Image (cartoon, helix red, strand yellow):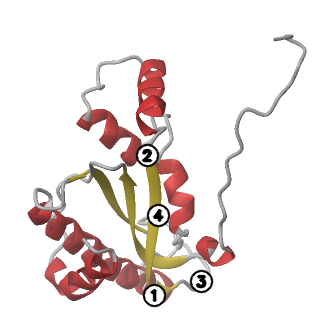
């Protein structure tokens, strides 16, 4: 083969619907699967420090990032689960890419509430922040209920939950009914 010849070796395609990029208070479920096993990560939208609730599609890119960011929980979850913690960063990336190359990634987003673009103000006790905190808290309760329910089912579902345990949200049981509906929709 001539080194000057350029050929297409592969063509990949992803279709994103515009509504997948709209801000909302939502819980999302990322499933990495192959024929034998599922790796699941549960997340939520709604920023703790700002009046923001970026769509889950934006979050998945950060979750799969290689950097030392605290947002790449999915990548770090796989690294931890497969025992690559002590590897050099480049080696971790290479192992991850080899591991994920024959798997599919699904991002399921379940909108719980609309997001309203409210003005950020200096007063953190302003009604805008109170509304945001309330809607974010509802979302956290559903996220926590989902995590707890999947922890109970991991053996029967042949899956690995990549989330750290999360029970610190008081009254997360209030999210159980919605969590059960999400699990039913996902056939989990």
Is residue 118 depicted above or below 1 in this figure?
below
Left-right relation of 23 to 41:
right
Q: CA distance from mark 1 to mark 3?
A: 14 Å
Residue topped by disc 4: 107
Q: Looking at the picture, how far across and down is residue 67, in whole percent? A: 50, 34
Q: Earlier in the sequence, mark 3 or mark 2?
A: 2
Around disc 2, counting alpha carbons within 10 Å, would you say few (fewer than 14), some (14 to 19), or many (20 or more)?
some
> Which tag is nearer the camera, tag 3 or tag 2?
2
> Which tag is nearer the camera, tag 1 or tag 3?
1
Left-right relation of 177 to 4:
left
Residue positioned most to the right: 4
Q: Looking at the picture, how far across and down is residue 153, in whole percent? A: 12, 64
> Which tag is nearer the camera, tag 1 or tag 2?
2
Q: Examine the rendering and report whether any part of residue 153 can be seen.
A: yes
Q: In which quadrant of the rendered view does residue 115 lie? A: bottom right
> Which tag is nearer the camera, tag 3 or tag 4?
4
Q: Are marks 3 and 2 in contact (CB under 8 Å)?
A: no
Residue topped by disc 1: 113
Residue at image point 67% right, 47% down: 12
């Amino acid at each position: 083969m001539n080194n000057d010849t350029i050929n297409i070796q592969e063509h990949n395609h992803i279709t994103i619907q515009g509504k997948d990029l709209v801000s909302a208070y939502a819980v999302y479920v990322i499933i990495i699967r192959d024929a034998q096993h599922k790796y699941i990560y549960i997340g939520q939208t709604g920023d703790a420090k700002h009046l923001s609730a970026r769509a889950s599609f934006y979050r998945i890119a950060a979750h799969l990032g290689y950097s030392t960011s605290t947002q790449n929980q999915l990548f770090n979850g796989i690294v931890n689960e497969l025992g690559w913690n002590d590897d050099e960063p480049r080696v971790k990336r290479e192992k991850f890419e080899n591991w994920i190359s024959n798997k599919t990634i699904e991002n399921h987003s379940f909108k719980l509430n609309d997001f309203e673009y409210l003005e950020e103000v200096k007063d953190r006790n302003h009604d805008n922040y109170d509304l945001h905190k309330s809607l974010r808290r509802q979302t956290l309760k559903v996220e926590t209920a989902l995590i707890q329910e999947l922890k109970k089912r991991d053996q029967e579902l042949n899956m690995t939950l990549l989330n750290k345990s999360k029970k610190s949200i008081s009254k997360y049981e209030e999210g159980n009914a919605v969590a059960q509906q999400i699990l039913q929709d996902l056939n989990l």
